[in-house]
Image (tube, rainbow, N blue to C red):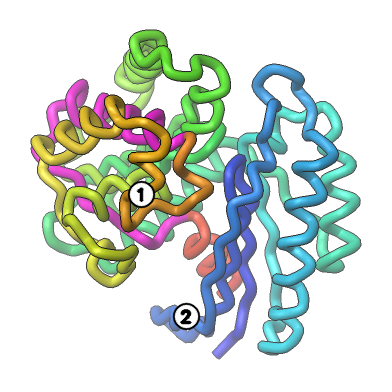
Amino acid sequence: MTRVAAIDCGTNSVRLLIADVEGDTLTDVTRRMEIVRLGQGVDKTGMLAPEALERTFAAMRGYASEILDEGAVKTRVVATSATRDAGNRDVFVDGVRAIFGVEPEVVTGDVEANLSFNGAVRGISDPPGPYLVVDIGGGSTEFVVGSSSVKGALSMDIGCVRLTERHDSDFAAMRADIDAALSVVADTVPVRDARTLVGLAGSVTTVAGIALDLPFYDSDKIHHSRISAADVHAVTKRLLTMTREERAAIPVMHPGRVDVISAGALIIDRIVEDFGFTEVIVSEHDILDGIAWSMA
């Protein structure tokens, strides 16, 4: 058995998984998530904002203390879209190295896609593959097709934070951006070969929680739930017409997602529509689990 610590630093959130890995079994010790909005303004400025860096480092300091307390022997820190795009990412790298004592990896979209796929499809045997795994992040969305291994992958710059900052509440412009990206995906990745759509990350899990009408966020009920295309469309339509206050009052809504959930919902809505899926299987396991498995 090996106790590992995986850290995923995305555009919107920074997350921690401490887990025990033994053979083909990964057992959670703890999972944490804090929304720090590291990618604040990156789409416009190309730089990580000082206040966003400090929010991220503050969360990471807490994680480092927990890793020490739990006795993890391996730690891997992965950073994705916002850090890839930032001209001052060296400031981020230096800060993370000082906190954890390991070199953070600013991974490519392809590496991110593979980690997400490996984390998501373990434990899914019904329905069968090939799978289209979509990981909707703050800065980008990863599209991965495969069964036991990856057959094709592509990362596109359509994330819930990026689209919200770019278009605010102009959902027609947002939809046009998404559809243009999906056209590229269809020409690049064999999405038409996929029999099952698997959706990852906070936008998808929040849409699922709303569709299931949960009184609070319940990851056990959300994990591997099947949300019909009709329910995805209904929830998205509802979110696009709500005020900020109405979205904030939804029981499963994390406060840090209130401003960006409409864009995130629209991304999964357009994927279901454009690629003709009748449902989406929602997974709470994603790139974070893939990072943990990579240290086994």
Numbered badge on residue 249: 1
CA neighbours of label 1 inside 10 A, class few (<14), some (14 to 19), many (20+): few
Residue extending farthest to the front is 245
- Of 98 and 195, which appears nearest the observer? 98
Q: Is residue 158 left or right of residue 235?
A: right
Q: Which is in the foreground here, disc 2 or disc 1?
A: 1
Residue 263 magenta-drawn? yes
Residue receiving disc 2: 28
Quarter location, residue 141: top left
Relative to 48, is 7 above or below?
A: below
Q: Is residue 201 at least partly visible in the picture? A: yes
Give the magenta part as a residue range: 260-286
Q: Amino acid at mark 1?
A: Ala
Q: Earlier in the sequence, mark 2 or mark 1?
A: 2
Relative to residue 218, is residue 84 depicted above or below? above
Amino acid identity at mark 2:
Asp
Position of residue 209 measured from the top left corner of the image (x, y, whole percent): 26, 55
Q: In the visual, does 189 lie left or right of 237?
A: right
How many other residues sit within 10 Å of disc 2, few (<14), some (14-19) or many (≥20)? some
Residue 19 sits above or below residue 56 on the image: below
- Rounded to the nearest angstrom, the CA distance separating label 2 from label 1 is 30 Å
- The residue at the point 71 percent across, 83 percent down is 73
Camera-nearest residue between 215 and 17: 215
SS of the residue under disc 1 = loop
